[in-house]
Amino acid sequence: MKVAMVPELQVPKLKEAANDLKRLLRAESEEDSKVVQKGLMLYRQGLVHHLKFVGGSIWATIQDVTPVRVYVSLADPNDSTCTCPAFGFCRHRMAAFFHAYDQVASVADWVEDWRKPAKESEQAEKWGMNKAKDLIKGRQDDAFNYKRWISEFQHSFEEIVLGQGKPTPYVIASLFHGYMRQLRATAPIHQEWKALYELVGNLYAFKQLTVMSENLGHSSETVDRYYRYLFDTIEEDIEDLIASLSVHSLPFDFDPFMEELKNETAELIETEDQFNFERVNLYRMFWSNLLKKASWRDEERERLEKFGDGKRTQAEDIALAHQYFLARRDKDTLERLKQLGLHTLPFMFYWIEELTSQGDMPRAGDFIEFLTQHVRTALDRMDNRHEARDFTRYALRNAKPYFRSGGREDLYEKLLSQTLPYSFIEYEDFLFAKGHYDKWGELFTYANFESLSVPNDKLKIVQKDNPVVLLPILHQAVDGLIAQKNRSSYKQAVRLLKKLRTIYKKLKRVPEWETFFKKLLDRNKRLRAFHAECERAKLIEPKVVEE
């Protein structure tokens, strides 16, 4: 084994990076599979050159159709770069990794080990399909009995998903798809009974998946990587099935099944685990759209209240808030939310959406005001910018119908200001549409103009109606562009300088412009390319440029 190229201290880091890449790239993903395949080809063709280790990273040149430069972080392969336009971990980074890894271990063994989950998943899917077919053949009748259904679901889950022992995380999805195909194939023919059967089956599937996940000790990261999407699919299917059942009055024959579903929802929220959000969301769906009898809701609310504060699970606490919401006891709902903390805010989106869809804008306004009061603290506690931006977009999208229908405009502006910088685009549009150009200009200054640009059509309007607003924006933009120190940015800076000169002339403040521009040239006198662009644009005479 060759080890000469790899510094001894980097060997453990390289092996750890190899394990990280196995988790980062999914063999069952067609896109990831192509990345590995093409990277392997580039490496085997000897197209990786000038590879070297710098600190805890790999640097290399890849001779592809056009040469590219690659940087691969061993501490976090996902935080790597390549000069190619591809998004994510590309074939060039893969090739550089293989070239380095070859010095400490077998690349072929890495590829084989990486492909193992995909092969096992394919085999598991075939086994699950065959097992499902056998169970369908062995089924005798369409008994309309809840306990009989549950017994069948349990038997099928154990036979298909758990029939080969404890499944590895990467085969669970394939086995589960087989189980759900079998469930749908054994549903009653009558449409309403079929929907009810699948609804109960999906709810039971959710419960079985959560129990299995806990029994296998799967972390949230493992669930996210391999089968979190199954829970999303179950939620979507349950929502659709409830919608189809709630369109018409349910037959009296369904009453015993509704009673059982009431008990099932109570069991859903008794457990505390990594699926708390999904548990409460399912509870919300059932009680909002299917379990609508006032007596049922009163009974459920009283049941939850009897536990007393401090004796309910987190899910039961949120469920009680939802029951208050359904009873139109909004003060009690919001009081519960204050006590429960900021992690309950996402459930407000469902309530706001429900109220605005019903046209109940006064109630929606109360919840939006509560959201506005607490959203800043919630955003400050989020782990990353993407999460905060997604949360802000969702909040604004849910609140927008209220404001469009004539809701308080001052509340909307407050929500926009409380969610900055994540609401910059929406806030900028709002201020401009209202003609609040002073605030609009302050917002652009606040944003520091680093990655933003003012659309030309807006510039023209503001330059005509309130040109003084543009002065700080353009000054800041010019400084930022010159600081980039390249010919393209100098050209952009000069275009903005010409706008500045025009505005100063319009405001009859020419001496101020001349003083500013002289200081700007002096401050950047070493930047000959910038002076050349100023000369080309006739901002300065040729004699001003130093030789």
Image (cartoon, rainbow, N blue to C red):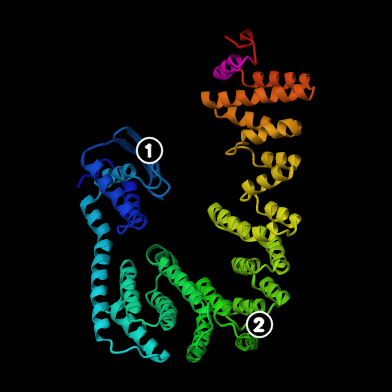
Among all residues in the image, which is located at the extreme top? Answer: 543
Q: Position of residue 334 (x, y in %)?
A: 70, 72
Residue 317 in sight in this render: yes
Residue 164 in sight in this render: no
Report how many numbered discs are placed on residues in the image. 2
Q: In the structure shown, which secondary structural element does the residue marked by tag 1 occupy?
A: loop
Q: Which mark is residue 156?
A: none
Q: Position of residue 224 (x, y in %)?
A: 42, 64
Task: Tell me if mark 2 has few (under 14), some (14-19) or many (20+) residues whose alpha carbon lies within 10 angstroms of its own.
Answer: few
- Asked if 481 appears above or below 215 in the picture, the reply is above
**Which quarter of the image is occupied by the C terminus?**
top right
Asked where in the image residue 438 lies, by quadrant, the reply is top right
Return the residue nearer the eye: 15 or 478: 478
Q: Position of residue 468 (x, y in %)?
A: 76, 31
* Magenta span includes 535: yes
The residue segment tinted magenta is: 526-538
Q: Which residue corresponds to mark 2?
A: 309
Q: Which residue corresponds to mark 1?
A: 84
| Amino acid type, label 1 | Cys
* Magenta span includes 315: no
Sooner in the amino-acid sequence: mark 1 or mark 2: 1
Q: Is residue 279 left or right of residue 20?
A: right
Q: Residue at x 40, y 81 (%)?
A: 194
Q: Residue at x 27, y 74 (%)?
A: 128
